[in-house]
Every structure is written in C-alpha cells, then in structure tokens.
Image (spheres, grey):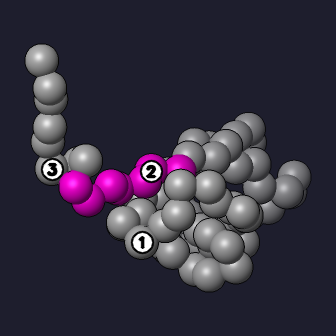
Amino acid sequence: MLLYNSQHARPQALVAANVTLPQGTSGLQRVSATLWVDDRPRARSTWSGGGWPGSGPARIALGYDAQGEATALKRLSWR
C-alpha cells in the first residue's frame, strides 16, 4: 500500500526545546523565542510571562513551513 497525504507535499517542521530561565527572574511580561535555520529567522512566538513556570524548564515548540529547506540542515539555533 502506498500512503500519501498533504504533509508529504508541504512539510511543516515542528522544533521543540526545554527552556529554563535564569534563577531569580521575576516580573516577566512575556517570553519570546525565535527559531533560526541556516542563519535566517524562520519562526517566532511569544508567551505570556504570567504563564511561565517560576522554576524548572518549560517546553516550547515552534512550527514553520519547511518546504524550501534542503534535506540536510547546516545549523539550527534558538535566540
């Protein structure tokens, strides 16, 4: 059986990370993250500071349209 769906035609990458804020961080209004692929920004998201945990890691994820990406990424980073 051959399976095909629209995800094969237009890939949507989902990149997740565990983020821990520096100890003593308080009074956050918001937390923002930008996903960079091969030195170009690909996705950005912002979360309310009130919903951020006071200690320990929080799991975040950003999705982006990966249709134009090569199969071998050279560099992936968060800023």
Count the labels in the image: 3
Res 31 visible:
no
* Residue segment shown in magenta: 9-15
Element on which disc 2 rests: strand
Q: Residue at x 58, y 80 (%)?
A: 41
Q: Earlier in the sequence, mark 3 or mark 1?
A: 3
Name the residue tied to disc 2: 14
Asked if marks 3 and 1 touch (Cβ < 8 Å), the reply is: no
Residue 3 coordinates in the image, percent (x, y): 15, 29
Residue 37 shown left or right of residue 68 in the figure: right
| Residue 29 locus on image (x, y percent) | 57, 74
- State the residue position of label 3: 6
Vertical placement of 66 versus 72: above or below? Answer: below
Q: Dot 2, crowdedness within 10 Å: few (<14), some or many (≥20)?
A: few
**Residue found at x 85% / y 57%:** 22
Can you tell which mark lies on residue 29? none
Mark 1: which amino acid?
Answer: Gly
**Along the line of sight, which residue is nearer the eye, 16 or 76?**
76
Which is in the foreground here, disc 2 or disc 1?
1
Q: Which residue was labeled with disc 1?
A: 68
Image quadrant assignment for residue 35: bottom right
Tell whether 19 sits left or right of 49: right
Asked if the residue under mark 1 is in contact with the one under mark 2, i.e. CB atoms within 8 Å, the reply is: no
Q: Looking at the image, is 10 positioned above or below residue 60? A: below
Could you say whether the residue bearing mark 1 is in a helix, strand or loop? loop
